[in-house]
Image: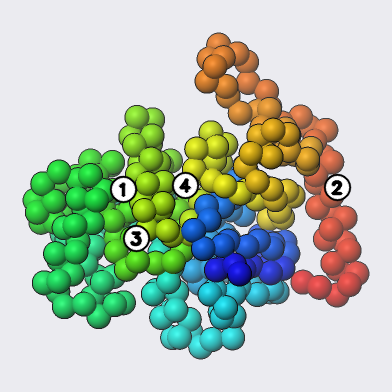
Amino acid sequence: MSFLSIQDLSVRLSNGIPLLRSVSLDVSAGEVRALVGESGAGKSMIGKAVLGILPRAAHLTDGRIVLDGEDLESLSPKTRRQRIGARVALIPQDPLTALNPSRRVGPQVTDRLVDILGWKRPAAEARALELLEEVHIEAPERVMKAYPHELSGGMRQRVLIASAFAAEPKLIIADEPTTALDVTVQKQILKLIRDMQQRHGTALLFVTHDLGVVSKIAQTLSVLYAGKVVEETGVEHFFAGPSHPYSRALLAATPKYTDPDGSLTPVPDSVVSAVDAEIAAFDAKRLEAGQR
């Protein structure tokens, strides 16, 4: 049984522009599923819909989000927040803006343990120290007392990873967690997330535009274009030969580390036009059926 099941999820802006078009996907316990596609494809919007933090102008118009057997849309706002807070965590893209600059690091890690699990503050602080050590932060006692601006970007991201795993969530949504880091630190953080996920057995929904990252961390992936899933498959099958023309074009456009001097291959206009026509036909069919 899937821990997270998204069924025919549609999200629109107040002006009617669709952001997600009947998205369906499942994430099983312990599974790592990647959401890939170009900027604006709707990858992060799926995570926001699950967490209940859609932008104010965006609205869920159709579909269901089932978390651990519960339909989140059937719950009261308070109960939904409690369920999500206890079972789901987020590793955001920019560690500097995600951490509160006016608070020391320690309380920002222990808050989840105190507020969600009801731990006493001393026990939460002891667990926070263990987590900071687990994410390979040296001198965790000093880091606990530091402010975010006193840490490097890589250390801030490690703090966010520790915070995400603090309450032992069953699902973590990682929204391009290495984008704001330099290449060397990206590799370290990616390995850390993978090791932590395997050690804790946590399901992971990993948002990225980097297919190189997908090959290293994910088991399954969903390819999005204009808010629609155009292909869903296993990672090995995808890299052996994706079935959708857009997926093949994305793979062909990925820089090859084995050929650093090779030219880049953009997604052909013909492929973009064909996928746009596919999306338009999908919208027309839903409109005719009276769906939103």
Q: Which mark is residue 164?
A: 3
First reached walking from the N terminus: tag 2 or tag 3: 3
First reached walking from the N terminus: tag 1 or tag 3: 1
Real-space Cα separation, disc 2 to disc 3, in angstroms: 40 Å
Q: Nearer the viewer, residue 168 or 270?
A: 168
Q: Amino acid at mark 3?
A: Ala
Q: Does dot 1 land on a helix, a strand or a loop?
A: helix
Q: Which mark is residue 176?
A: 4
What residue would you read off at disc 1?
A: 157
Q: Nearer the viewer, mark 3 or mark 4?
A: 3
Residue at the (68%, 23%) spot, across then down: 265
Q: Nearer the viewer, residue 98 or 234?
A: 234
Question: In the rendered structure, are the residues bearing label 4 and label 2 in contact, judged by CB atoms less than 8 Å apart?
Answer: no
Q: Nearer the viewer, mark 1 or mark 3?
A: 3
Q: Residues within 10 Å of mark 3 (few under 14, many from 20)?
A: many
Q: Residues within 10 Å of mark 1 (few under 14, many from 20)?
A: many
Real-space Cα separation, disc 1 to disc 3, in angstroms: 10 Å
Question: In the rendered structure, are the residues bearing label 4 and label 1 in contact, judged by CB atoms less than 8 Å apart?
Answer: no
Image coordinates for residue 71, horizontal then vertical, percent: 59, 80
First reached walking from the N terminus: tag 4 or tag 1: 1
Q: Nearer the viewer, mark 4 or mark 2?
A: 4
What residue would you read off at disc 2?
A: 277
Real-space Cα separation, disc 4 to disc 1, in angstroms: 11 Å
Question: In the rendered structure, are the residues bearing label 1 and label 3 in contact, judged by CB atoms less than 8 Å apart?
Answer: no
Image quarter hosting the C terminus = bottom right
Q: Nearer the viewer, mark 1 or mark 2?
A: 1
First reached walking from the N terminus: tag 1 or tag 2: 1
Q: Does dot 3 land on a helix, a strand or a loop?
A: helix
Q: Nearer the viewer, mark 2 or mark 3?
A: 3
Q: Is residue 24 left or right of residue 209?
A: right
